[in-house]
Amino acid sequence: MEASEFPRATAAAMSTAAALGLTADDAVVLHDSNKLTLRLLPCDVLARVAPAAHQVAQFEIELAQRLAETESPVAALDPRVEPRVHERDGFVITLWTYYEPVPPQEVPPADYAHALGRLHAGMRKLDVPAPHFTDRVEEARQLVAGRDHTPELADADRELLADTLRNLRRAVVERGGAEQLLHGEPHPGNVLTTKNGLLFVDLETCCRGPVEFDLAHAPEEVGDHYPGVDRDLLRDCRILMLAMITAWRWDRGDQFPDGRRLGTEWLGRIREALDSRGPDAHG
C-alpha cells in the first residue's frame, strides 16, 4: 500500500473497531504489502486493510472459517465481532485474532512440513472455487511482457523471465502430478509461531495445483520432511516460483522493501538454477 495511504487506512481500521465496540486508541504497523496489517490496541485485534477494489477479502474469511472447522492450522478471525468484511472510507477491513509470537522464531523444518501437511489435508476436504496456479504464472508473464509495467527490466533479463515462466509452467503441468487446493504462498512470512502451534495466514493467494508448488515457497529443508514429494517437480516449481516473484519485483508499482536489489539477485539465482537443471531448461 502507498505510504501516503497509511493514515487513512489506519483511521479506517480504528474507526471500524470502535464502531464494533472494540477500544482502539493506537495502531502498530506489522506488515505492509498490497494490504496493511495493523495491531490495534488496547483491544489487541489484528486488522487487515486493503483498497476497496481488493475483492478477495470475503473469500479469505469464508475459507478461514471452513478450514477452522477441519481443525487446520490457520489463524482465526476475532471471535468478538461478526466474521465479515467491513467497508469504510474506500477500504475493506477484516479483523483477526492477534497471536503473540513465541520462540523459536525460526521454525524447525520437520514442524513446518507437518503443519503444511495438516493444512493440505484440511484443504483436500473442501470443494471451493479457486484459480489454478497457472493463472498466477500468467499474471507474472503479463508483467514481463508489458514494458509499461516493467520499464527497468533489461531485454536479456526480460527474455530470461519470459522463457522461464513459459517453459517451467509447461514442465510442471506436463508432469501430471495430483492437484488440490493450496495456500499459494506458504513462505515463512505467512507462518506464525504461537502457543497454539504453527498457524498459516494470508489465504487470499489460494489456488489449485500440486503440493510441490506450495513447498516451493518454503525453506528447502522443509521438502525433505514432507512425505511423497516428487523431487524433480519440486525443483521445477522452485525455479518457477523464483521467476514469478522476480517479475513482481520489477513491477514499477512494487512496494517491496529493497525490491530492485532482490530482483537483480534473483535473476542470477534463476540462471544458476537453470544451468543446474540441464539444457532442456532453456527451451
Image (tube, rainbow, N blue to C red):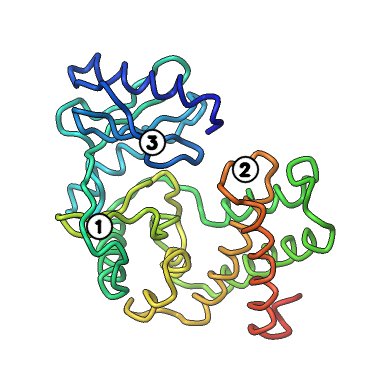
Residue pointed to by mark 2: 254
- Could you tell me residue 3's position as x and y percent? 54, 30
Residue appearing at x 17%, y 54% in the figure: 71
Residue appearing at x 23%, y 40% in the figure: 98
Q: Is residue 131 above or below residue 104?
A: above
Name the quadrant of the C terminus.
bottom right
What element does badge 3 sit on?
A: strand
- Kind of residue indicated by mark 3: Val
Between marks 1 and 3, how big is the CA–CA gap? 19 Å
Residue pointed to by mark 1: 193
What element does badge 2 sit on?
A: loop
Frontmost residue, 157 versus 136: 157
- Kind of residue indicated by mark 2: Asp
Frontmost residue, 151 versus 102: 102
- Could you tell me residue 148's position as x and y percent? 79, 40
Outermost residue on the right side: it is: 155
The earlier-in-sequence mark between 1 and 2 is: 1
The number of callouts visible is 3
Residue appearing at x 30%, y 67% in the figure: 107
Q: Residues within 10 Å of mark 2 (few under 14, many from 20)?
A: some
Q: Residues within 10 Å of mark 3 (few under 14, many from 20)?
A: some
Residue pointed to by mark 3: 29
The earlier-in-sequence mark between 1 and 3 is: 3
Residue appearing at x 26%, y 21% in the figure: 25
Between marks 1 and 2, how big is the CA–CA gap? 28 Å
Frontmost residue, 251 versus 69: 251
